[in-house]
Amino acid sequence: MSFRVRLTREAQADLERLFDFVLERELARESGDLALAEQALDAIRAGLATLQSSPFTCRKAGSSPFLRELIIPFGRSGYVALFEIEAPASVLIVAVRHQLEDDYH
């Protein structure tokens, strides 16, 4: 079975915020790697793509069995995507955050 993966506007804004954060951090460094921001975004997109085939393998995030979190490794830490399995073939990405952030925005 293949699931359709969609992002809320808020989740899309999270991706842009995370990209900008990495880009700004690398610009501030003397020997910063500007490609790192795109690599982080690629890692997140690749992680989200795995939800097309196996969203139920991710850990539950709350009392609902349909609200879950996907851990996306990147570098020494990574990202966490909060998503909801909406229907038999649909997954909605609600938010994305860096693992070191306190909570979702």
Image (spheres, helix red, strand yellow):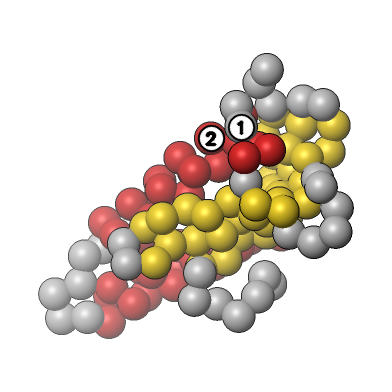
Residue 57 versus residue 80 in the image, above or below: above
Query: For the residues marked 1 and 2, what is the alpha-carbon distance in whole angstroms?
Result: 6 Å
Front-most of residues 21 and 51: 51
Position of residue 85 measured from the top left corner of the image (x, y, whole percent): 78, 40
Position of residue 67 measured from the top left corner of the image (x, y, whole percent): 78, 51
Residue 71 visible in the snapshot:
yes
Residue at coordinates 85% horizontally, 59% vertically from top-left? 63
Residue 67 versus residue 51 in the image, above or below: below
Position of residue 5 measured from the top left corner of the image (x, y, whole percent): 67, 35
Locate the N terminus and report the quarter of the image it occupies: top right
Marks 2 and 1: in contact by CB < 8 Å? Answer: yes
How dense is the environment of label 2, judged by Cα within 10 Å: few (below 14), some, or many (20 and up)? few
* Occupied quadrant, residue 55: top right
Residue at coordinates 68% horizontally, 38% vertically from top-left? 56
Locate the C terminus and report the quarter of the image it occupies: bottom right
Residue occupying the far left of the picture: 31
**Residue 103 falls left or right of residue 41:** right
Identified by mark 1, the residue type is Ser
Position of residue 39 measured from the top left corner of the image (x, y, whole percent): 33, 52
How dense is the environment of label 1, judged by Cα within 10 Å: few (below 14), some, or many (20 and up)? few
**Residue 73 falls left or right of residue 32:** right
Q: Which residue is mark 1?
A: 54
Q: Count the marks: how many?
A: 2
Residue 103 versus residue 4 in the image, above or below: below
Which circle marks residue 50 in the picture? Answer: 2
Residue 57 versus residue 18 in the image, above or below: above
Front-most of residues 20 and 2: 2
Element at label 1: loop
